Structures are given as structure tokens and as C-alpha cells.
Image: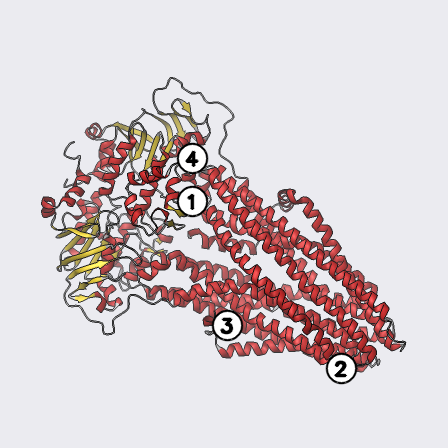
Amino acid sequence: MLKIIKRLSLSSVIAAISFLLVQIVCALYLPYLTADIVNKGLITGDISYIWSQGYLMIALSVGSLLGALVNTLIFSRVSYKLGGELRSDIYRKVLSFSNYEFDKFGASSLMTRNTNDVTQVQNLVEMGLKFVILSLAMLVGGILMTALLSPVLALIYLGVVPFLAAAAFVVYRFASPLYAKMQKLLDTLNRFFREGLTGAKVIRAFNNEDKEYEKYRASNREYTRAAITAGTIMSVFVPLITLLISLSTLLIVWIGGTSVAAGTVQIGSIMSAISYAVQILMGFGMMTQVILSIPRGQISAARINEVLDMPLSVKDPQLPSEPEKGTFCFEQVDFRYPGAVRKTLENINLKVEEGQTLAIIGSTGEGKSSLVNLIARLYDVEKGCVKIGGIDVRELSQTKLHGLVSLAPQKSTLFMGTIRENMLLSKPNASDEDIWAALEMASAMEFVTSLDKDVEKSGGNFSGGQKQRLCIARTLLKDAKLYIFDDSFSALDFKTDTLVRAAMKEKLKCAITVIVAQRVSTVMNADLIAVLDHGKLAGLGTHEQLRASNPIYQQIIDSQFYKEVAV
Amino acid sequence: MNGKGMGDNNNKKGLINAKPKNMWGTIKRLLGYMKKSSWLLVLTVIVAIAGTIMQVISPKILGNALTLIFNGIKQSSGIEFGGLLTILLTVAALYVGVFITSFLQERMMTVVAQKTTYTLRNALKAKMNKVPISFFDKNATGNLMSIAANDVDNIATNLQQSVIGIISSAILIVGMLGMMISISPILTLLACVSIPCSLLVMTLLTPQTKKNTKKYYNLQGELNGRIEEIYQGFLVTKSFNGEEVALRKFDAVNAKLVTSGWRARFFGGIMMPSMSLIQNIIYVLIVVVGAVKVVGGSIIIGDMQAFLQYSTQFTSPLVKLLQIWGNLLSTIASAERIFEVLDAKETLDYQKEFPNNDDETAKVVFEHVKFGYNGATLMKDFCMEVKDGQMVAIVGHTGAGKTTLINLLERFYEIQDGSIRIDGTDIRNVGPDKVRQQIGMVLQDTWLFSGTIYDNIRYGNAKASEEQIYAAAKAAYADDFIQKMPDGYNSILGEEADNISHGQRQLITIARAFVSNPDILILDEATSNVDSRTELVIQSAMKRLLKGRTSFVIAHRLSTIYDADRILVMDKGDIVETGNHKELLSKNGTYADIYNSQFAQKSA
């Protein structure tokens, strides 16, 4: 939290605090003047004195309002600016992540950190800064002003403070963990409910409605219990503090009374001291509010800092090199996902020349996507190296590398906007003709009527096959040295699949093409087919070679064609 | 995550502009949910009244103490400490009384509010089990979540604050006004000037606050949507060097968000100080006028002190009442949204018996079934008979009604005419649970709940033994990858189960279906996300498992088609062709068409 507070501009904070102090000092001085009016005006019957002090009071009120206006302005600006800054910094940082860091958090966790956690911190900074100072000033100021009126009376308030502190400590110690627990239970409760919605069919198919209901009810009961306990603690706390302060005012009247009799305290002072009790009470109430909201904000702050402090695993080299030719190769590459026991890829050796097509085939989870992700350096290898144009990808700047490689990932991803906007992502300066040409290659002309056609969130208004074709078109639009299609043809029927691959041949003539697929028909025409099995290269060669000698490749063929012969 | 962010925002917007439709009806119904705690509620009201009265009279009595002191010095007869002590002890007793009553009312109201929302939550959850599946087609998850989470929460918070708030504020206002008038009607009039002034300030500032708050939430929704999209498409953004563009768009919205945010906060924040200025000015006037009166002898000093206390406290219950009114409206709007869900139509419970056919030899029969989603007719007159132990492959273009068939058999949707029978019994004559007990299914959507893999597999049959679960996992070829995970079978799947691949999730759902050991098996494109080699192994394992079972497979793979006893070719909600692969191909009809576009491979 401290780290985030340090981001605030010192001058603004000082200015805000000064105006806050103006507000409080003016407000605190009012009861003092009342005492003055009573002591000097009322008792002596000096009406003109009462008036003159009254004017002063009104002037002070106006001053207090001005102070309040300015400090509210500065505080709200400062905290919302901080929120905006944090939001933008997290976003920037996440965009600089490689997949390694991104996976560590996960998309939904990063989203929460970027949105809800920032809002939490923003609120805490605004409320916290303002109210900590406000409450302290009211607390200390109230006691000080009472001391100014009569030191004896101030001692009474001073005596109450330890009790107040003890009460606050108890709340902090017992109530705030309870609130944290409540939040957790509530999250579970909501998760159960959400699962009941998203899994409605499965739950019913397995007749688990009652089980789900019981699970929810048990969790609901636990939450309700925690909420009642927390509520009970709070319902003792507020009245207790009020009671303590109220009783101390009685003490003030009693001791004040004896002192008045002795002539050491004037009656107006007693009246004002009672007014200060209200100030002290308010100050204390605010303080506990802030204290209670600190843990939640602190958790959010910690979550934000985790993102901001995350070291980048993929770093740009000090002196980036320039690749010459468009070959690429894997040399004894080992790779494993962070924390995994087993290697995902082991001892991969490959070499592809300019103009060639490499196809990668293998079962689910055998590391096909991992392999192509290594080319785009979305992860770093554990051992060995990946080279493009004879240069290790780690020696290229990421911008340069991503400029060389055009990737269509496994999950067809489109963004909200128009088709044109989605296409321009891969080549910002492309003309409409370029885009149409790419769409034509991807057989996407039949359903794209206009480049201004809207694309809904996540491409929701397109079918799976249409999304894939748009993604293929986007990948083709970019002028790259290396084109990667990670299972990008799976949702296309055989006719379209063949058509698209034939159309893109011309464009990719001088580049390297990498195709990941599960269908033999998609890969059979490739110059080089890599068969992956359990993370290892189980075969490398042309369709004919592999069909003749590679048992795993034969198995794959059989699984897809096996009864064709029989029919 | 998808609907969550937006849902929150929609709800917040809803909370700002809450307009109840049927206020009294809703309040009555909400009170119905508090029936269980009705005596607590009554007690709370009594305690609140008692507490507030004590709160109202204590300043007046304390004022007497001051008068005593004042008179003591004025008349130089000395202060009568015995009397003073009595007064102070009385007030102390009142203070303790206020403490006890406020604790009691807070605590009781917490219980009432929490118990009420506990009941509401359970009712909502139970309702979700009773509504037909079509309900979920019409109501977005985000929206329902927002009702179950935010609206219920809104009721809990406001219920607790509003009930006590209304009672105590009303009594405070009346009581204080009474006390003030009894001290001095003229000063009371002066104090009341603050009411219209405060209202003026509120009407000046509230629109600005509202406007900016609304803008803030809208922009926040927009920005959150943007973040969500970019994070979900992270790979694409990165690999196309799209960071710059993404940042530029983000910054533009973010800047606007910051501006509307601090403006909303500013206008909201200066409300209180502006009101205190008014209060302070009035306060000064009261002091001055009061002082004149005290000097003139028409008000005694203790009453003056009491009056000052009343006048400073008197506007706060007024403001509070106004706030409560706003909260109450939003509470009722929340309750209305909840009740709307609770009133949704439930799965039909037919009061009549449909004719069974006891001599039927077929396992599953569809007879003249008529059905359509939302009024549009999809199936006009659908007939089909499947024998015990048959494996039926269903083939057809998208929208041909393949999934509908499954939905009807599972009784997720109700047919409009005709009948569906299993073993001769109309499925509407027995409860849906009885029907579903016989059917196991693996859906296209691989739903898993957050929990261990073990529990997810066991979900198919709570009574399954440990061995059965491991056996099922092995049969589904899931054992291998599960063993490789850090915690094996005890690995916890995340909420969206994104720590395993789609293919792996599919395998777990297959294992789950194995465990349930059903009579009838439904596979809805279940293997379309498993690569063909893995699928081949699954197929052979399934073949073993399918023995003696009737199965329906929505086919997307050649191997499925070859293995099927029968292929049903569907088009526009009807069976257009039926037979085995060879027969159908020779007909050169719809099947041949589909086969050529979806399955055939030119070079094969």
C-alpha cells in the first residue's frame, strides 16, 4: 500500500491537507467561540459582543466551507488520477508480459486486478487519506480545544482515549478477519450459484439438483452465520463508543460544576466542551471506518503490486541482431511449462528452408501448440535454441520477431469492432484492396459483405468456421517471413480446407509456412511433416516417407481412414 | 467472468435509477419472507422506539444540570450538588439505556436481514433447479448472477439500515421538534429554516453527481469490456504487435473515466460541507437570538444548551430519511427483480396420465412429436424407433435438429404434441429424474465444477467406489494425464476449469459418463475436440462399454458413422433418410451430400 501511496504527488497532497486543516480548524473554533459568547456575552448581558463574535463565527463557517471545497476537489482528483494511472500501468505491464507470466495469473485474475482491485485502492486512498487526517484532527483538535477552555476537562477526554483505542483494537482484531472470511464465503456462494446456471443441463442429466441445492444451502448457512456474528460485534461497537463519550460528558458536567463553583472554569466552557465531545466521537467513528476498510484495500494493493513487480521472463536483448535469410530451425530444444514435472517438448531438432511448408501432427496435449508458441517466443525454451534466419530468437527484439512471424492461434480470436479493424491489427497500413485479397484467399468473401460489418464481442456473430477463416485472412494479410497456422483449419469442411490452402500457396511462396493439424488430409502435401508423440519428435519426413515407415503416422492415418478400405 | 463484470455494472446502474413497479405489493411480499422473524421484527420496533425516546429526552435533562450550575453561581447560593448528582445519574441511566437498546435493535435487525436473505437465496437456488432449461436461453447468466448476488446483497444491507432508520428518524424528528418548541417556538422556527436551505443544496448538487456517476459506470463497463477482450485475446494482440493500438484505445477511455470519476466524487463530497455551512449560519443565529433571550430571561441557560444540541442534531435524521427513501426504492426494485425470477414458469407437471404402450419392444420411441423453440416449429411430425442395444448415429447440417432430439429425450424441453417413450412408458408419466437416471450424456459444452478431478468424475454417480472412478478414468483415457498433474486426482479445477486443455476436459466428462453407468448413452459431438488417435482408442473402449446399452451419437467423425447400427439423417427437424453408411451413400441423397462436404476426403 505504501508503495502505491508514494505515487501521489507530494505538492497536491500537501495542498489538500492544508485546506483540510483550514476546514477543520475553522470548524473546531466554532464551539470555542460559543463558549466565549456565553462566558463574556451572555453572563454579562453584552449583546454587541455577542453580535461581533457571531459575525466571526459566520466568517469561520464560510472559511470552513471553502477549505472543504478545495480539499475535496484535490483529494478526489488525486485519487481518481492515481486509480487511472494504476489501471493504465497494470494494462501496460500485462501487455509486456510473455505467455509465461500471463498464464501465471490467468486472464480472469488479471482482469479483476486491473478493474476491481484498482477501484478498491482508489477508494481507500481517497477515503483513507482524507478521513485519517480528518479524524485525527477532530480527535486531537477536539481535545486540544477543550484544553484551551479548561485543562481539567481535557484530561477527562484524554482519559477516555485508551478505552476507545482498546475498543478499536478489539474490532480490528476480531471483526476484520470476520469480514475477510465473509467475503470469501460470499465468493464461494456466488460461485456455486453461477455453476448452477452454467451447468444446468449437466446437473439435471445426472440428477444432482438436490445435491447442488444442499451444497448451496450449507454454504449459505455458513455465510449467514458469519454475517450475523460480524454484525453482532459491530452492533456492540458503535453504541459502546457513543456510550463512553456520552458518559465522559457527564463527568465533564460534574467536574466542571465543581470547578465552576471554585471559579476555575466558566459555564460556557462546559457547554463547549460538550460540543467537542460530538467532534471527538465523529473523529473516532471515522477512524474505525478507515481502519476496517484498510485490510481489503491492502489485499487489493498487494495483488496489484504482484502484477507490477512481476519480472519479465522474456526480455529484449541488449544489442538486437538482424536476421538474414528466412530459414528457421529447432536445435535440441527442451521445454516445460513452469512448475510442471514433465517436459512438454524434448530434444526437438528441425530445419525448414525458405518457401517450404512444415506440418506438425500429433495427439492432443503432445506439445504441438507449445512448439509453435516457441517460434513466436511466447515462451522461452529450457534448453537448446530456436533460430530464425540463423539467429536465436532470444537475440531479436520482440517487436522485430513478432514482425517476422504471423500467427493464427488455436483459439480463433476476434475483437469487438468492424472487420476492417480486426484485419488492420496484423497490418496497420493495409489498403482495402489488400484486406479483400486476404479475405478472398481465406474463402471469407461469401459471408463478408462489407469491411464495415460489425464484429461482436469475441466474434459472437460468426460461426466457428467463419471465425477461423477471418483469422486465417488476418494472418495472411501480414507480410511476414513465417506464417503459423495452429489448428486453424479444424472447423472448415474438407472442400474449404483444400481451397484455402491452395489459395494461400501463392502468397506464401517465399515464406515458411507452419501448419499444426490433426487431419492427415491437411498435412499430407507439406514438404516436411513432423510427428509429435509424447513431446518427442517421432517422425520427420514427407507424407510418402512417413506412410511407408513411421508406425505412429500409420496409426494416425488408420484412425482417419481405417474403414474406407472396407466399405 | 464473462457476464460478471457487466452484470455488476448493470446492477449498479439499476441501483441508481431504481423505480419500483408495484411498491406495496412487493413490500407485502418481502414482509412475507420475514414471517419467521416477525416477533423479532416487532421487538426491534419496540426497542427502537424506546431507545429513540431516551435519546430525545436526555439533552433536555442534561440541560437542567447546566441550569442548576448557572443558577448556582448567578444567585451565589452555591451549586446544589445533590440535585446535580441526581440529574447526572438519571442521564447516565438514559445513556446506558440508549446503549442497550441500540445494541439490541442492531443485533436483531442483523438477524432479521440475514435470515430473510438466507431464505431468499435458498429460494432462488431451488428455483434454478425447477425452471425449464429454456429459462436459461432467455436469461443471461450475468443477469441472473447479478440478481442472486447484488440484488440480494442490496436487500440485506438496506433492510438492516432502513427499518431502524425510518423508525428512529421519524421519532427523532417529531421528538426533537416537540422539545425544541417547548423550549422556544421562535428559535424552532429559526432552526427549521435550515430544512428548505438543505433541500435547495441537494437539488442543486444531486443532478451533477448522478450524471457523472452514471457516466462513470458506463465508462467503467466499456473499459472493463475492453480489458476483458484484450486479455482473452492476449496471444493475438502480442503476436501482431498490437500493444500500441490497444494502449491508445485504453488510454482514451481511461482518461474520460478519471474525469467523470472525480467529478462525481467531488459533487457528492461537497454536499455535506455545504449543508454544514447552512447549519453553522443558523447555529450562529440561534446562539445570538438565544443569548438575547437568555439575557432577557425568557429562556434559561440549560434549555439553551439543550436547544443547541437539538438544533445541530435535528437535520441529520431528515437527511437520513431522504436517503432511506432512495434506498428503499432501490431495495424494492431489487426485490422485484428477485420475485420476477421466483415467479418464472416451472417445468410442467402434467396432471394427466399419458397412454403407455406396454407391449412395445423398442427401447426408445418418438411418436408424432411436434416441437419448436419460442413458437417457431422445428419438428412437425417426428417419428423414430430405436431398439435396445442399438447405436444410432445422427447426422445433419447445423440447425437440422440433432441437439433438439437429445434435449427432448432428456426432457430438457417439453414436446408440444405426440409422445416420447422409453421401454413403453411415456416420459411425462414419470418424473424427469427417473428419465435421466437411465440416460448418461457427454455434452458439447464440457462443464466441470470447481473442485477436484476426482469429485468431478464422481459427479456421475455419488455412490461410485474409488476403484470404479479410477476404472472410468482409465476407460476414458484420462488416467494418463491426470496422473501427470501435480496433485493427480486431487488436482483442483479452476472455476472455468482453464488449467487443463479442452480435450482433457472432454475426457473427464467422458469418464463422468462412464461412472454413471446408464442404460442409454448420449454423445453430443462429444469427441469432436479429441484428436483422431485418442478418439480411436476411446471408440474401442466405448464399444465395450456400449454393449447392452442404447446409444445416440451426434456424429462428426467417420469412425462413428461406420460403427453405428443405424444412421439417422436429419434435415429441418425431420428424419429424411435412415440406414447404414453403404445404403445411404448409394441413395445419393442428403446423406451423400453431407458426407461429401463434411467427411469425405478427396485424396482418400
- Do callouts 3 and 4 mark residues in contact (Cβ within 8 Å)? no
Which mark lies nearer to you, 3 or 2? 3
Could you tell me which residue is drawn at 82 percent across and 65 percent down?
B87
- Do callouts 4 and 2 mark residues in contact (Cβ within 8 Å)? no
Q: Is residue A201 left or right of residue B33?
A: left
Q: In this view, does A373 lie to the left or right of A550?
A: right
The residue that mark 4 highlights is: B412
For residue A52, which numbered disc appears in the image?
2
Respond whether the residues carrying marks 3 and 4 are from the same subunit: no
Q: Which chain carries label 1?
A: A
Judged from the image, the secondary structure of the residue bearing numbered disc 1 is: helix
Task: Estimate the spatial distance between the alpha carbons at disc 3 and disc 2, rounded to whole Å.
Answer: 39 Å
Q: Where is residue B543 in the image (x, y as percent from the top left)?
A: 26, 32
Task: Estimate the spatial distance between the alpha carbons at disc 4 and disc 2, rounded to whole Å.
Answer: 82 Å
Q: Mark 3 lies on which chain?
A: A
For residue A10, which numbered disc appears in the image?
none
User: Which residue type carries mark 1?
Assistant: Thr
Q: Which of marks 1 and 2 is nearer the N terminus?
A: 2
Q: Position of residue B503 (x, y in %)?
A: 30, 46
> Above or below — where is A66 with respect to B139?
below
Task: Estimate the spatial distance between the alpha carbons at disc 1 and disc 3, rounded to whole Å.
Answer: 41 Å
Judged from the image, the secondary structure of the residue bearing numbered disc 2 is: helix
Q: Mark 2 lies on which chain?
A: A
Total numbered labels:
4
